[in-house]
Amino acid sequence: MANDVAPFTEAELKEFLEKRTVVVVCAQPASAKSVRKLAMQFGARVDLTLLCETFEDAKKELSSRPVHLLIADLHFDKNLGLELVELQASKFPNRLEIASIMMCGDPSSSTSGMLADSDIEGVLIKPFNTENFKTVLYSSMANKVKPSPYWRLIENGKTLFNADDYEKAVTVFESAKKLDPKPALAFYYLGQIHRKKKEYTQAVQVLEDGLKLEPKDYRCLSALLDIKMEIVDYPGAYDAAIRLHADYPVSIRRILDLVKLSIYNKKYGDVVDYYEIFKQLDHKDPMITRVIIAGMLVCSKYFSLQGKKAQALEVLNNTSKIAIETLIFRIEVLRYYIETGHVREGEVYFNGLPDDIKAQRDGQIAALELMNASGQSGQLVQVGTKMIADGIHTAKVYKMMIENSKKLGRSGTNIKILEDEAKARFPEDFE
Amino acid sequence: MVRKNAQEVENKNPFFTLEDFKSIEMIIDGLNSTSQVKIPGGVDAIQLVQILPDGVWIEVPPKSCAMGHTLSLHIIARWLAPQPAEKEYVETQLHILGVIEQIEESKRGRPQVRLKFRQFAQEHWDSLLDYFTQKQLSLNELIKVTRK
């Protein structure tokens, strides 16, 4: 194919690299020096190959000068090396002249997905050796040293697309289509132009046309999923997700949408898959955590309704671990233990929560719900009376108090007082 | 489930499968034989950084070793076996004995040391290196096909 690795000699790579600036960003000096030495072995010039030990230094360097080849650690505490890639690209009209390589330890499936989703040209896995470095460098520079005519047009079209000059971009991408037997990338950008113009039907059609030529094209499949989400076609988006992730790892960026899609399409069991991916994440974003917990809770209820009690409990136990670790939705998890009939396990979970959480308003109400579920009517009425006296007034508390007072055979006067109070405070709930 | 249903799709990618992107499980326990200080596996464990012809660059906890010290590494690793295979996982254990020939301190990160091998099981070491080479090739292919 015309856009496959353009063959170039070692001498051509050397000639290309020796005129360009290389920046190596790595917290460990030994690694940084090794990578610089290797880059220089393949042509990078000593005076044009710079080392940055911190993320901040790298940002300064990339802001102050054009950097052609960036080789950076993927993780810097809470920062991602991918942020540097954007900064590097901002100095150039397109990626014909530049390449970025991320370095990381053996990446998880979701990290691999995230890297596939980015604009980088290569990933160097640690531990690396000279041969692996050479392989990554060569494949990263494939469309830089000797770009094919097809690739040149794609990059030029991207420049026009990014400048919102859609008319000219269409002409360029249409020309590109003629230069490659499977020009799926040209179709992808044509689809993106329609998407920008909110011509969704045409966008989907163009992407499907591209997929006829290259059924597994990542960009076309990925764009199809994005568009279906954008137009709120959740069944269509779910189908697109199936097609995309049949062959490609799930990106961290997508987990949020995929969990939502599973819920919207009632494919609750899928959430367990995403939980497995979530577990491996180095940095657990609070929003993703919330969505995973919420999805897992819905999933547990689904399993419970299906009579799959053991699966429901397993999901709940996994959810409780995340909730305790991340301090998110801790009380909600307890409610699902109760709702799915796992009261004893709920008690164990609740007893393990910190005292300050139990003492909070929601914690006290949850404790009352546990007593209600486990049939401890006497204790419930005693604790509930104190809670009402302390100003914890919710319809749920009153309902549990009235029901359990009746069970205990308390005097009609006591129950009447509770019912009157409840009606006065929550008329809609106690009609 | 999304991926499991989808695996029924025909025309699988010939260069990599989703299984290729599952990470290795690796624990490296270290013992500084000179100072008799243990470096247990875990969050602050030793990490492999770069493979050299006669040794390896590793990342170590601060102040765990010095130049000339002898370091003993015990590596336990498990990864998905390339299919078809009799076993689902490849498991390997190896001992490496080496001498620290260079130390690079870091302002922000952990120190890295160059360990020159004195004793190690070549076959097990090569098997581990094969995993990383294969993973590198799969990832190269993933990046390549997602940019076509």
Image: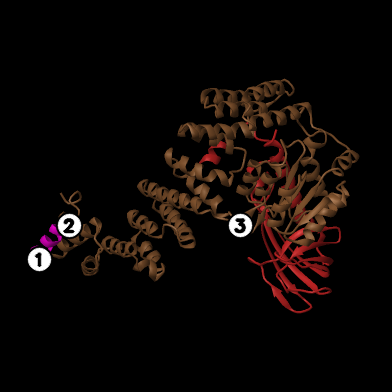
Chain colours: A brown, B red
Per the rendering, the mark at residue A377 is: none
Our reading of the magenta stretch's main secondary structure is helix
At mark 1, the secondary structure is: loop
**Cα distance between the residues tagged 3 and 2:** 49 Å
Whether residue A137 is visible to the viewer of this picture, yes or no, is: yes
How many numbered circles does the render carry?
3
Tell me the amino acid under the disc marked 1. Answer: Ser
Per the rendering, the mark at residue A78 is: 3
Whether residue A124 is visible to the viewer of this picture, yes or no, is: no
Residue located beneath label 2 in the image = A422
**Cα distance between the residues tagged 1 and 2:** 17 Å
- Judging depth in this view, the residue of B69 and A55 nearest the camera is A55
Q: Residue at x 63, y 35 (%)?
A: A218
Q: State which chain disc 1 sits on.
A: A
At mark 3, the secondary structure is: loop
Q: Residue at x 66, y 44 (%)?
A: A86
Magenta segment: A410-421
Give the mark nearer the N terminus: 1 vs 2.
Answer: 1
Asked whether B6 falls inside the magenta stretch, the response is no
Query: Given the current orientation, which residue lies at the most extreme bottom position?
Result: B35
Q: Nearer the viewer, mark 3 or mark 2?
A: 3
Locate residue A410, reporting x and y percent: 12, 66
Residue located beneath label 1 in the image = A411
Alpha-carbon neighbours of circle 3 within 10 Å: few (<14), some, or many (≥20)? few
Q: State which chain disc 3 sits on.
A: A
Locate residue A213, reporting x and y percent: 65, 24
Residue B59 falls in which quadrant of the image?
A: bottom right
Query: In this rendering, is residue A230 above or below A392?
Result: above
Q: Residue at x 73, y 27 (%)?
A: A153
